[in-house]
Image (cartoon, rainbow, N blue to C red):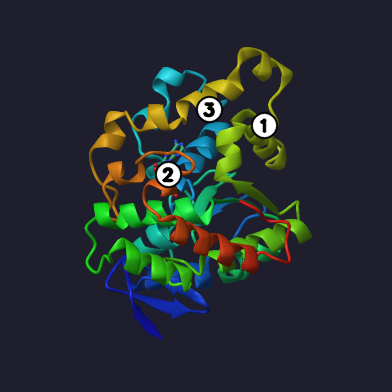
Amino acid sequence: PKEEGWVSNHLHLYHGCWITPRYMPGVLAFQKHFQARDTDIILATTPKAGTTWLKAILFSLLNRVSYPDLQKHPLLTSNPHVLVPFLEIDLYIENQVPDLTSFVSPRLFSTHLSYNSLPTSAKVSNCKIVYLCRNPKDTFVSLWHFTNKLRLKGTNSLEEAFDKFCRGVSLYGPYWDHVLSFWKESIENPQKVLFLKYEKMKEQPTYELRKVAEFLGCPFTPGEEAKGVVNDILRLCSFDNLSTLEVNKSGKLSSGEANEAFFRRGEVGDYTNYLTPEMAEKLDRITEEKFRETQLKF
Ligand code: A3P
């Protein structure tokens, strides 16, 4: 089935997930050809959950020994999406069977696919998945701005887009199915999937970063703690720092999106400036219903 979309003209429903046709060749090739290594780390997110932020954090965390001098850090000159490419949007779109040998283990990749849609090897291998989601109201507002900023053909009004989002029609949606797919796996297999929320990362960043480091088997040493490495990483990756870097204020990604489109406000609760109380209540109601069987709250 097809439905008019707001990222490209149409989103297609593929195995229960709304995907833009532009990404389909990459999705299919990724699912067919990707061979996960046990040491791989896959960063999975719903669009606009804070992917750019988490890419920066994971890259800095895993490469902290290689780049002790923060004045020469790759994040100062490269957009996080260049340092941590999307599997189905970057690597497997450019080439159906990309050469991934230049990635040194632990390889760090990212995806927007739901857990159920991941290639089998990503599920059965011992690779680790760090999942980040964000409350649906801010996710929706952020996604709406993103598509407007890129002036994508078929962009809907806020009301139209909201109606679609509520019906599950959004890029990589339904939003709730996406979140639930990783949440379930994180409960059943906590060694495999770490489930994070944007709001918690904002509220207690040092706690969350230490948790991620433990999960990935590279906890901060007492020496690093004493030197303030945790805060150094958080400062480097903060919205205020990344959004003001020249590399992120200009230029485009190879996929065509402007680098600056990934940095807007970077706050929790901006939805109050865009959604009416009725709209917010409606999303809350849907969310409560969808997550009724879980402990999930936003
Ligand atoms: P807003 O539109 O609410 O500002 P993604 O990276 O998944 O595309 O998500 C983009 C959202 O994350 C945007 O949210 C963006 O401003 C925010 N963001 C980008 N970098 C961030 C950072 N370093 N810290 C916090 N939020 C960030």
The Cα atoms of the two marked residues, 3 and 1, are separated by: 11 Å
Question: Circle 3 sits on which residue?
Answer: 234
**Which quarter is ligand 1 in?**
top left
The Cα atoms of the two marked residues, 2 and 1, are separated by: 24 Å
Question: Circle 1 sits on which residue?
Answer: 207
**Left or right of 203 on screen, residue 78:** left
Residue 184 appearing in the image = yes
Tag 2: amino acid: Asp
Q: Write down the quadrant of residue 275 in the picture.
A: bottom left
Q: Write down the quadrant of residue 171 in the picture.
A: bottom left
Tag 1: amino acid: Tyr
**Crowd rating for badge 3 (residues with CA inside 10 Å; few <14, some 14–19, many 20+):** some
Question: Residue drawn at (38%, 39%), measured in percent from left and top?
Answer: 265
Q: Nearer the viewer, mark 3 or mark 2?
A: 2
**Which of these two is toward me, 295 or 275?**
275
Circle count: 3
Question: Residue drawn at (39%, 65%), measured in percent from left and top?
Answer: 162
Question: Residue drawn at (56%, 70%), measured in percent from left and top?
Answer: 117
Disc 1 residue: CB within 8 Å of ligand 1: no
**Left or right of 34 on screen, residue 97:** left
**Crowd rating for badge 1 (residues with CA inside 10 Å; few <14, some 14–19, many 20+):** few
The picture places residue 59, in percent across and down from the top left corner, at 51, 37
Question: Circle 2 sits on which residue?
Answer: 270
Q: Is label 3 in a helix, a strand or a loop?
A: helix
